[in-house]
Image (spheres, helix red, strand yellow):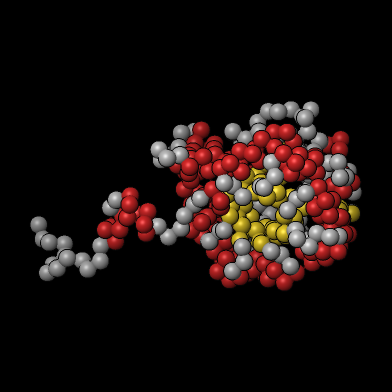
Amino acid sequence: MKHPFPGRHPATRPRRLRQEPWIRAMTAESRLVPEDLIQAVILREDDAPAGPVPAMPGIARATADEAVEIARKASALGLPALALFPQTGPEHRSAEAQLALDPGNLMCRAARAIKAEAPGIGLIADVALDPYTDHGHDGLLREGVILNDETVELLTRQALVLAEAGYDVLAPSDMMDGRIAAIRTALDEGGYADRLILSYAVKYASRFYGPYRDAIGSRGVLQGDKRTYQMDPRNAEEGLREVALDVAEGADMVMVKPGLPYLDMVARVKDGFGVPTVAFQVSGEYAMLACAAEAGAFDFEAAGLEALACFRRAGADAIVSYYAIRAAEWLSDPAR
Ligand code: PBG
């Protein structure tokens, strides 16, 4: 047989860097540690059914008491924060989303309980009206139109109620124009200059939110879609303009959402702006991994860790995930 490299060996053999675990670890370009992981938690009232979330095997909604336990566990594993979302039954939803402004609502009770019993972990609140509206939209709806400025006014009040309950990070996920500046001003004037804003700056109108809408009780009620405020999945430049606006308006951190199908945006945002960039591995991504694992396509743990590592490679500083705690346990297991 003819020698494949006539006259000499190849000067560079990339496989030399891959031959043993120690050299792969030494030259790895990114790392995944529990400090990168934010646990997403869907809250439920004590009397709401405890069953699993459809299409999300292994995920159950948590009562406020259970959320305290989750916070303790997350803290012990080194997770920096929890991101909370409330399930709301149809009987508590309304056109004007009044429950969003009630300091006694589930989100506020859970924050107070966690801050009292398990202080030290960061709490991130979704700021948007969709868990509270009877039409399932993130904003106020009049004659088929989502009202921007009226919604922003409500969101600023919602942000203050959440800050008062103890949330460290306000995370507007509604995609109304101008809401970051309005919320920043309201927080500063309300005595909450220390609270952070994590803007869902690059948020797409995505089918991958399907299981989440089941989880919070929005699926049956949502009228139409969210394409007049969430972004078109075909667009990238528009997302960069959104980030520029939100950073100028006072966002401390920005979010890209969904995650895996949008890693180009994670990379471009991180490279282009250099601000803390968080990616949301959304409910439909969890469903894809968990349902495929259940069907025997792969091992959930291995595929799940691979997916999270890819977020880090793309440049995400932190990842919101429905299996953040499980991933932290896998990462901390010395047998791995
Ligand atoms: C709504 C909101 C959504 C998610 C987080 N906040 C859904 C939507 O915009 O319809 C999705 C989370 C997920 O799918 O895991 N403000």
As displayed, is residue 99 above or below residue 63?
A: below
Say which quarter of the image contains residue 214.
top right
Image x and y of residue 58, in percent: 59, 33
What residue lies at 81% left-to-right and 47% top-to-bottom? 165
As displayed, is residue 315 above or below residue 72?
A: below
What residue lies at 67% left-to-right and 47% top-to-bottom? 120
As displayed, is residue 96 above or below residue 72?
A: below
Image x and y of residue 326, in percent: 54, 39
Q: Looking at the image, can residue 117 be seen?
A: yes
Q: Nearest the camera: 258 or 277? A: 277
As displayed, is residue 105 above or below residue 146?
A: above
Q: Nearest the camera: 111 or 293? A: 111
Left or right: residue 38 versus residue 219 is left
What residue lies at 53% left-to-right and 43% top-to-bottom? 328
Q: Nearest the camera: 183 or 202? A: 183
Left or right: residue 310 versus residue 114 is left
Q: Nearest the camera: 233 or 197? A: 197
Q: Residue furthest left?
A: 1
Can you say which quadrant of the picture contains the N terminus? bottom left
Image x and y of residue 145, in percent: 85, 57
What residue lies at 57% left-to-right and 46% top-to-bottom? 78
Can you say which quadrant of the picture contains the C terminus? top left
Left or right: residue 44 versus residue 211 is right
Q: Looking at the image, can residue 219 be seen?
A: no
Left or right: residue 136 versus residue 233 is right
